[in-house]
Amino acid sequence: MSDAPRQIEVLAPATVANLTVGFDCLGGALDGPLERLILKRCKVPGVKIVAIHGAELPFEVEQNVSGRAALSVLEKLGIAGTEGVELEIFKTVLPGSGIGSSAASAASAAFGVNALFEGQLSPADLLECALDGECVASGARHADNVAPALFGGLCLVGGAGCEIEHLPMPDWHLAVVHPQIPILTEAARAVLPANVPLQDALGQMAQLGRFISALHCGDDSKAARLLSDRLVEPCRIPLQPEFYAVRSAAISAGALGGGISGSGPSTFWVAPDQETAQSIGAAIAAVFEAADTANHVHITKLSARGAHIAP
């Protein structure tokens, strides 16, 4: 490892999880925003967080998503007792936004440490390390955000959360709107029912199957129109600021489909082209501005690129 770089900068994408139709099993990487992490090799073994920009987060490694994921990679490589890394964290994907803040932190750290030390961890091992970080934030090892943040693309997560299938990626333009009201994943999960009616479960299974079929057939518009959920989203709508007005504005502006991004409060809306996506974003922003709610609008697309070294 003597010829390995002493410092690298890593970027990891924000993500949209669930995609309405696939609770806890679908997630897609976005072109932007991108999380930024600077990693530097140091003489002191282990992980040290030297600075955090853009959010108030713990500096204690075991309580920090990036720190825990980074330490897991050092442990997996077998060098935690001999090698060290310093992290400078730039939180562009804000906590509580619903667009994969913790996943971006976990993915950038896991990918970055492995690259910094020229590690040869398998994709499965990298995912396990990133999930160690994600678990710090959400208390659960769910990979619907982490997998696309790490590997890019549109991911179907199955099994114990570590079986990943890359689905055909639709050519969607997206308006992702983030009202500046945080909703923590734990709170969004607390409102979910322990049991659901059998007919609703069967209907949702069929809807997900039709969605995946539409992707494989290359019918991106049909896939967008299949973005509906009868199990989870109805329970979370009361947590969402101005949801019904937002949905009405999005559809009126030309959205083909959409819904809550992850646990919210961000929503995502599919458009056939960039101009329509911009119109949708402006219409939703107007709803929040009328309610005196600050918001960020991201006009973006799904991206095949996950965590990577900055050019």
Image (cartoon, rainbow, N blue to C red):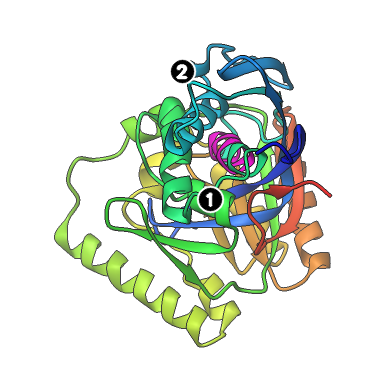
- Name the residue furthest bottom: 217
Q: Is residue 4 left or right of residue 150?
A: right
State the mark number for residue 68: none
Overall secondary structure of the magenta section: helix
Helix, strand or loop under label 1 = loop
Tell me which residue sits at (62%, 45%) in the image: 118
User: How far is the residue under mark 2 from the one under mark 1?
Assistant: 24 Å
Q: Position of residue 277 (x, y in %)?
A: 76, 61
Quadrant position of the N terminus in the picture = top right
State the mark number for residue 120: 1
**Label 1: few (<14), some or many (≥20) within 10 Å?**
few
Task: Determine which quarter of the picture holds residue 255.
Answer: bottom right
Residues in magenta? 102-112
Q: Which residue is mark 2?
A: 62
Q: Position of residue 286 (x, y in %)?
A: 77, 43
Q: Is residue 139 left or right of residue 45?
A: left
